[in-house]
């Protein structure tokens, strides 16, 4: 075919070469065809329809000015005439904008007399808003307080939250006319800032506007307005918090010394005040609000350490915190109060304590706490944070290791007494000294575990004296949790979340029950709608609080926190299975009957099925995304068919991606196969990784390791006497205890060697410190020599400059003298010439006269 086309093309070219007129006619016809096509297409109509003009987004009855054409110039005009205005930028097609429309209309109906509500369509391409602003998401809410703004609202677009934020913008400051209102203002757990301004000299002091702007700056950073700003105008009220100077800003803190804004060190601007407050504030309970989209907010907070997450009903429009939140805040305050002497606003003590718990990895039961006592009159007590230098920490850790690890058991104390505490002078500051206390923290039990303790003590196996000390009952009263933060190395952070907005997250963490019941206000007041969990991201565990009906919320939380803080925590890790993932709203679902061939295990049915003493259990670990697991399904099915008539072998599988298992039953990769033989569940065997997973290999593996072949002398499945089994378990436990004793002896030897090495390192550090001191002295002498040499060089340079100036002046004078000499010489020559001419004239006259 291609050959024919080439021949035709050659013939056409040959004819055109013989007839040039035919070639010209072809070119003319092609040009005419192109022109016709061009004119035809240019007069064709557009096939793309023009965009429809936008329509009103808000209803006409809503008190919202809807600028659906994107008239941004009218926004400036409306904002200039209103004291507080809200600008709602939306896109008419955006589902989030449609959902927020009803919420904004509800808020506008409540606050129409105080706030100007304006909605702008920022998607219309012909509008001015679309041309000037490039928003990456919708809706966007901006608030303006007079000339200050915009204050972007970044919280949930829910009517109570939006209205609460607007009310905070309307009244950013709280007036405190008396001492009673001041003490009530400072009694809340939230951070508080007080400004003192006297309105006697002028209607409005110059610093008051700056202080007001700093409160609005804080709302820019935190839409919840957790930091409250108050203002005092009476000098007598200001003296209650030691404010004597006018235009002073006071930051109230519970656990450390309260601070006054240093006007000599920082500029008195709104940004500086806001940054200073956020830098030095103390947060007891922190609110969290995940945005609901891809964000690392929760991960950043959980990476800081163990966190106590409390989901509770919250109404942001309440003037005072809810009783449930107040209980949680009181628990957090007592948890952080290390010395039970919180710094109040009227504290007259002469010393302040800065405490820090030093981690000693050699011992998990010894906690050593170091406190630095600073006098209140010292120059560093009001402006410097509580800090320990690295060198001081090294020396203290060396001392505390000897204090905590090498003290005889009879000397270890449970309270801060003279036998367990020592005072160390602070060589780096003349104003304070260190106080080091070492003691032992014992685990605490809840009520159910305390009841089980006597039964455990009556067991036939008793631990040796060198093993773990017996647990004691939890301390009753408020002293059980007071200062617990400084008595343990597992410090908790308290976070509060709104259960109405974060219920799916609570379900994923283990919440059960009905969502509507948890959101009821009466349930929140009683503490029934509170869900509490401790998440430890480092250990990848979380614990859920299971409250007893007779216990109050405070008692349950205290026991929960105390059990977690124990050196050997008695809390059980919360496991999430497929039934928990399906039952998100707490409804009861009936479990599907087990399969005939392969038993499908979940989190709840795992231990009863695997720990069945009368059956050999072959367990297959898989996930739904594992391709190799899908390939092996037919092998597992064939094995189950062969063993279907055998009642002593169970073939089971578990989806480890959807079912959490205890750590001792997890595997490092999938697919994996484990065999749990009967009567020897502690001697589970893993299928070799280097062996192909085939049907003959699996049968050989089961016959080799099952309890019915190798351990035929074990009691039969129908035996009613469990004495032999208990005796075997008893012997196994004795062997484990003996192994633990040997391990303890080796560990003691290693600790002794480490202690000697540490002492050697301490002496080496002292020698290095002496060398460092000598080097410093030599450095100072070299610096003195350098300064003296620099001074001499500067003096020589100065003299050289003076000589250069003098030589330059002499050169100028020399030049001037030369000029004068030349001029004088010329004048002398002129005079001589004139004298000669005069003499010649006189000679002529005398000659003529003669």
Image (cartoon, grey):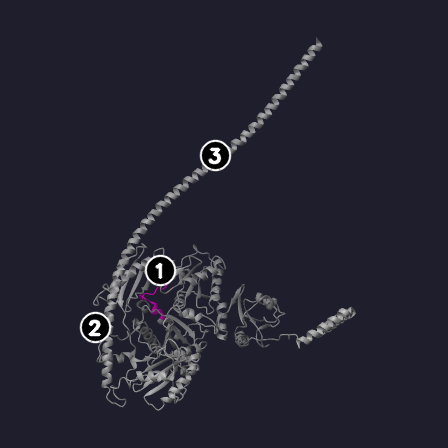
Quadrant for the N terminus in the image: bottom right
Mark 3: few, some, or many residues within 10 Å (few <14, many ≥20)? few
Residue at screen point 51% across, 66% down: 151
Badge 3 marks a residue whose secondary structure is helix
**Residue 64 image offset from top left, x and y in percent:** 57, 73
* Tag 1 near tag 2, CB within 8 Å: no
Residue 86 vs residue 758: left or right?
Answer: right
Residue at screen point 79% across, 69% down: 21
Residue 728 vs residue 786: left or right?
Answer: left
Chain part drawn in magenta: 332-346
Quadrant for the C terminus in the image: top right
Tell which circle, 3 or 2, labels the residue nearer the N-terminal end: 2
**Residue 830 image offset from top left, x and y in percent:** 63, 21
User: Disc 3 versus disc 2: distance between alpha carbons?
Assistant: 92 Å
User: Disc 1 versus disc 2: distance between alpha carbons?
Assistant: 40 Å
Q: Is residue 829 above or below residue 625?
A: above
Mark 2: few, some, or many residues within 10 Å (few <14, many ≥20)? few
- Name the residue beneath numbered marker 1: 387
Badge 2 marks a residue whose secondary structure is loop
User: Disc 3 versus disc 1: distance between alpha carbons?
Assistant: 57 Å
What secondary structure predominates along the stretch shown in magenta? loop
Is residue 512 magenta-colored?
A: no
Q: Is residue 434 above or below residue 298?
A: above
**Residue 772 image offset from top left, x and y in percent:** 32, 51
Residue at the top extreme, as displayed: 850
Q: Nearer the viewer, residue 485 or 148?
A: 485
Is residue 344 magenta-colored?
A: yes
- Name the residue beneath numbered marker 3: 803
- Name the residue beneath numbered marker 2: 465
Residue 357 vs residue 92: left or right?
Answer: left
Residue at the bottom extreme, as displayed: 645
**Residue 643 image offset from top left, x and y in percent:** 35, 88
């Amino acid at each position: 075919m291609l050959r024919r086309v080439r021949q035709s093309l050659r013939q056409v070219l040959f004819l055109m070469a013989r007839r040039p007129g035919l070639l010209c006619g072809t070119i003319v016809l092609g040009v005419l065809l192109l022109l016709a096509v061009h004119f035809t297409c240019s007069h064709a109509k557009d096939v793309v329809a023009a965009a429809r003009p936008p329509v009103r987004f808000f209803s006409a009855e809503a008190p919202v000015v809807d600028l659906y054409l994107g008239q941004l110039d009218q926004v400036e005009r409306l904002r200039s005439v209103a004291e507080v205005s809200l600008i709602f930028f939306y896109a008419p097609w955006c589902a989030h904008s449609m959902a927020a429309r009803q919420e904004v209309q509800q808020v506008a109906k409540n606050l129409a007399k105080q706030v100007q509500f304006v909605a702008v369509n920022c998607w219309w391409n012909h509008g001015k808003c679309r041309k000037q602003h490039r928003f990456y998401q919708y809706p966007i809410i901006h608030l303006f307080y007079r000339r200050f703004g915009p204050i972007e609202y970044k919280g949930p677009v829910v009517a109570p939250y939006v209205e609460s934020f607007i009310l905070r913008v309307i009244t950013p400051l709280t007036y405190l006319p008396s001492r009673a209102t001041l003490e009530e203002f400072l009694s809340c757990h939230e951070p508080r800032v007080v400004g003192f301004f006297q309105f006697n000299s002028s209607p409005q002091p110059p610093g008051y506007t700056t202080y007001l702007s700093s409160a609005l700056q804080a709302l820019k950073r935190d839409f919840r307005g957790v930091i409250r700003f108050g203002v005092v105008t009476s000098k007598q009220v200001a003296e209650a918090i030691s404010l004597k100077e006018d235009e002073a800003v006071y930051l109230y803190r519970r656990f450390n010394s309260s601070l006054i804004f240093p006007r000599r060190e920082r500029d008195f601007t709104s940004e500086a005040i806001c940054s200073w407050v956020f830098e030095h504030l103390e947060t007891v309970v922190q609110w969290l609000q995940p945005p609901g989209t891809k964000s690392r907010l929760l991960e950043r907070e959980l990476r800081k350490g163990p966190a106590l997450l409390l989901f509770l009903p919250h109404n942001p429009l309440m003037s005072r915190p809810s009783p449930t939140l107040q209980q949680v805040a009181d628990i957090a305050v007592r948890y952080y109060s290390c010395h039970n002497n919180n710094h109040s606003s009227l504290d007259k003590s002469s010393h302040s304590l800065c405490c820090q718990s030093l981690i000693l990895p050699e011992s998990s039961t010894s906690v050593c706490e170091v406190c630095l006592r600073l006098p209140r009159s010292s120059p560093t007590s009001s402006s410097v944070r509580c800090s320990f230098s690295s060198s001081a920490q090294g020396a203290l850790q060396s001392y505390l290791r000897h204090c905590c690890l090498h003290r005889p058991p009879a000397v270890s104390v449970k309270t801060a007494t003279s036998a367990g505490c020592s005072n160390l002078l602070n060589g780096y500051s003349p104003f304070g000294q260190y106080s080091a206390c070492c003691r032992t923290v014992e685990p605490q039990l809840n009520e159910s575990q305390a009841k089980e303790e006597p039964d455990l003590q009556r067991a036939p196996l008793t631990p040796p004296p060198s093993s773990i000390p017996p647990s004691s009952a939890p301390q009753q009263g408020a002293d059980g949790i007071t200062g617990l933060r400084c008595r343990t190395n597992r410090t908790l952070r308290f976070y509060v979340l709104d259960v109405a907005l974060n219920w799916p997250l609570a379900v994923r963490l283990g919440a059960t029950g009905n969502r509507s019941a948890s959101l009821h206000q009466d349930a929140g007041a009683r503490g029934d709608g509170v869900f509490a969990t401790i998440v430890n991201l480092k250990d990848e565990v979380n614990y859920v609080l299971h409250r007893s009906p007779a216990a109050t919320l405070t008692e349950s939380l205290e026991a929960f926190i105390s059990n977690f803080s124990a050196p050997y925590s008695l809390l059980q890790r919360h496991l999430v299975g497929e039934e928990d993932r399906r039952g998100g709203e707490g409804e009861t679902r009936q479990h599907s009957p087990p399969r005939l061939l392969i038993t499908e295990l979940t989190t709840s049915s795992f231990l009863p099925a695997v720990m069945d003493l009368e059956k050999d259990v072959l367990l297959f670990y898989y996930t739904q995304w594992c391709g190799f697991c899908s390939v092996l399904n037919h092998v597992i099915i064939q094995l189950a068919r062969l063993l279907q008539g055998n009642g002593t072998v169970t073939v089971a599988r578990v989806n480890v991606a959807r079912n959490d298992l205890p750590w001792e039953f997890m595997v490092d990769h999938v697919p994996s196969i484990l065999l749990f033989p009967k009567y020897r569940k502690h001697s589970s065997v893993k299928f070799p990784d280097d062996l192909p997973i085939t049907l003959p290999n699996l049968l050989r593996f089961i016959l080799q390791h099952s309890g019915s072949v190798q351990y035929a002398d074990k009691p039969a499945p129908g035996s009613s006497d469990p004495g032999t089994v208990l005796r075997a378990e008893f012997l196994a436990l004795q062997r484990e205890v003996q192994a633990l004793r040997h391990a303890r002896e080796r560990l003691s030897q290693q600790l002794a060697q480490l202690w000697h090495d540490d002492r050697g390192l301490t002496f080496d550090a002292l020698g290095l410190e002496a060398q460092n001191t000598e080097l410093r002295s030599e450095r100072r002498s070299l610096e003195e020599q350098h300064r003296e040499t620099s001074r001499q060089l500067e003096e020589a340079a100065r003299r050289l400059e003076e000589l250069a100036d003098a030589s330059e002046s002499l050169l100028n004078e020399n030049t001037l003298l030369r000029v004068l000499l030349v001029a004088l010489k010329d004048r002398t020559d002129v005079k001589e010439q004139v004298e000669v001419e005069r003499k010649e004239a006189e000679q002529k006259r005398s000659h003529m006269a003669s």
